[in-house]
Amino acid sequence: MALIVQKYGGTSVGSPERIQAVARRVAKYRAQGHQVVVVVSAMSGETNRLIELAKKIQAQPDPRELDVMISTGEQVTIGLVTMALMELGLKAKSYTGAQVRILTDSAFTKARILSIDEQNIRTDLANGYAIVVAGFQGVDENGNITTLGRGGSDTTGVAMAAALHADECQIYTDVDGVYTTDPRVVPEARRLKSVTFEEMLELASLGSKVLQIRSVEFAGKYKVKLRVLSSFEEEGEGTLITFEEDEKMEQAIISGIAFNRDEAKITVRGVPDKPGIAYQILGPVSDANIDVDMIIQNVSIDGSTDFSFTVHRNEFNKAMSVLKNQVQQHIGAREVIGDDKTAKVSVVGVGMRSHVGIASKMFRTLAEEGINIQMISTSEIKISVVIDEKYLELAVRVLHKAFDLDQESL
Ligand code: ADP
Ligand code: ASP
Ligand code: MG
């Protein structure tokens, strides 16, 4: 007998029929003698609908009140899934985040889980119940409802698995595993049988939304056995996230290509090249709570230089206005220019550690298509470039092929 946490995303609970299919899978596992905790998202489209609704009342919704309303989507699905389980004759019980007591900090709309009280759930499991927990939501120490950021039900799933010391956390979604890149953009993309945590962390943080990055961090920290599977198929081994490189079955140099359309680039031109400038530029940006991604400073010519960085596209206007004030009042730079039509493409693979020439192959491939690279950043196992958004899909496709990731190349 094993304890299994199964997390189902929006499409997997998107209709009464899909909810009944979830219940049938849970019943199958129960019949095999396993204990099952189900974590569910809101029905597909529901969280977006609720956010749009909020914006009709308040253009910039109050974060506490936004969390009060956008957390309701998951409350609907836990009720429905529990009813579907009862209809199959199972003992089942739902829990909201607050009922479990998934304690988070108070950072509304992007809260972090601090602790989980799993005692009641353990007792219910021992008494033969299948448990259904609302993903994406928690409660802070003052009893305020919080949410964990978009895609946050993945993190609830992994955190529940960690708290319960589950044997496995299964993430059921609308694709049958983690692919070499988003299969909706590159039909030739290939499912990976396994991927290392390190690679998955990079892929998630660089834009592959199949897993929320915090869920991967959690799984790494608490050594949760994590598998991504399709809720639309009866069988299938999905993709296992492994801890050790040598556990990997496929030894490709590059495991995958991630991309992110939401980048915006800002350049401060003619910055005096002297100590403290990076701080003077990025300090006010960070004080305005804007996350900065890539940063590049050019060599100085005649004592002045250009300084570029990227931010999320949603924060572009805010960052531009913060900087324009700063540049005019304090820095003495020539001008601030911005481009919110950029995108980031990254190749990821632990094999990069032992192979040279990956960067030059990436740059040559993009050059052959006439795609200009605006910024580059590297780490031990990834290379990212910022390019014009209009070339994004072309870039992903040609890189996928160049690194022998296309299906037919196997
Ligand atoms: P859920 O609602 O189940 O959480 P998501 O939409 O959040 O599902 O994540 C699944 C989607 O992630 C897939 O439909 C796919 O388009 C996208 N995706 C992006 N990159 C990848 C990748 N490397 N492998 C698999 N899916 C990916
Ligand atoms: N329903 C939430 C969202 O759409 C959480 C999730 O689906 O993981 O972001
Ligand atoms: Mg998701």
Image (spheres, rainbow, N blue to C red):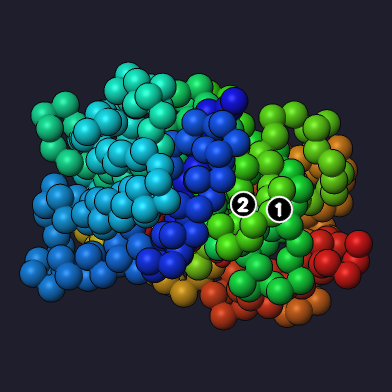
The image quadrant that residue 393 belongs to is: bottom right
Q: Are marks 1 and 2 in contact (CB under 8 Å)?
A: yes
Point 22% across, 65% down: residue: 50
In the displayed structure, 144 sits above or below 9; it is above
In the displayed structure, 198 sits above or below 359; it is above
> Where does residue 51 sit, x and y in percent of width and height?
23, 64
The numbered disc on residue 155 is: none
Toward the left, the furthest residue is 57
Quadrant that contains the N terminus: top right
Q: Nearer the viewer, residue 230 or 221?
A: 230
Q: Is residue 242 left or right of residue 3?
A: right
SS under mark 1:
loop
Q: Nearer the viewer, residue 326 or 105?
A: 105
Mark 1 → mark 2, Cα distance in angstroms: 7 Å
Q: Amino acid at mark 1?
A: Gly
The residue that mark 1 highlights is 236
Decide: few, some or many residues near mark 1? Use Cα within 10 Å; few <14, some 14-19, many ≥20.
few
